Image (cartoon, rainbow, N blue to C red):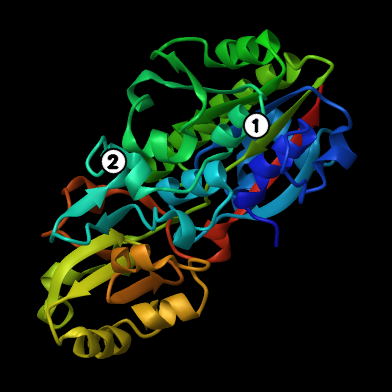
Amino acid sequence: MPSICDVLPSAAAVLSAAGAVDTLGLTERIGDVRRVAVMLVDGMGWHLLPELCADAPLLATVLAGDAGRLDELACTFPSTTPTSLVSLGTGATPGEHGILGFTVKLPDADRVLPHIIWRDDPPAAQWQPVPTWFERLHRAEVSARAVLPAPFIGSGLTEAAYRGAEFHATTTGEDYAARVAEQLRAAPGLVYGYTAELDTAAHLFGIGSPEWHAAAARVDALLTRLVEALPSDAALLVTADHGGVNVPANSRIDLDADPRLSAGIRVVAGDPRVRYLHTDPGAASDVLAAWTELLDGRAEVRSRDDAVAAGLFGPVHPDHLARIGDVVVSCIGDAAVLATAHEPPEVAKLVGFHGADTPAEMAIPLITFRG
């Protein structure tokens, strides 16, 4: 299955960047173009498209086969935004780039790094050493720009995923579609954009909620404006970082409320759909056995070695192994593992989640439009 890792290398190949390979076959479907916009819609999973279409006329026409071209891709595991954004930006798997979860334990301390609020500790180039495609395009003398909300600029995650891009900051209330279109017209090359509205609504109110449908309508309007603004020598690629599921109250397990689950655990990382459990010395096998028994039918529970051997993360660089828990818990169905004593209380109040390797979370679209 083609993946999110293939998007930027294929776009770079369309733009004739040296060393880029069009593994997605974009050249066949969009022809000779000088400008490519890549728009990532956070949370727009493949399996959500039929439900989104009720409030999204453009997406409805795409799904009906009357506009653009729709293909299925996979995101990388865990199916969480930090991991997916860096997989997109580098074209590398999580085991290679090292952004292995929503939160991970720092190797030399019992401290958890939340990637979405990470700034400069640890330094981005050290924590994520793989070159990005923005850097590669820059070296190939192909313009590569990213239009992002101002608070994102300079963050560790932005540097890890997009370093090498020419950044253009936007402010709240600004006409985002107009800014992306302006950059696309300004010069040949690649322009990257991102919107989190749909994912935010899924987390706070749930997939299928009125708020989620309202966000879908706004995202569809944004995409429509971008399609309408495409120059004749341009293409627009729309993709996502993950899908998602709603987790009802009776499917939530709080590890901190069950002594059988909390025993032997030193640090908890990951997120409610994929937990990394870092154990006390000598406790890993007991933790693995207890979690395997207690979460039977609700999660796949593996040792770190077994998770790596199963290829969940792609090849894992030795320097990144310690970022994965001694025990890896990946939920199935609609289960989630809360950690109320380890995480902000807001996490337990969320409705929609993602992170595991179910099709509902891993499958993402690639929609291609030609100007």
- Residue located beneath label 1 in the image: 56
Q: Is mark 1 on a helix, strand or loop?
A: loop
**341 or 65: nearer the eye?**
341
Q: In this view, does 186 lie above or below 365?
A: above
Image location (x, y in percent) of residue 62: 77, 37
Q: How far apart are marks 2 and 1 (CA)?
A: 40 Å
User: Depth check: 186 or 342 in front?
Assistant: 186
Residue 324 locus on image (x, y percent): 32, 67
Cβ–Cβ under 8 Å for marks 2 and 1: no
Does 152 appear above or below 311?
above
Q: Tag 2: residue type?
A: Pro
Dot placed on the residue nearer the N-terminal end, 2 or 1: 1
Q: Which mark is residue 33?
A: none
- Quadrant that contains the N terminus: bottom right
Which residue is at a point 48% across and 45% down the rendered structure image? 86
Label 1 packing within 10 angstroms: few (<14), some (14-19), many (20+)? many
Which residue is the site of mark 2? 123
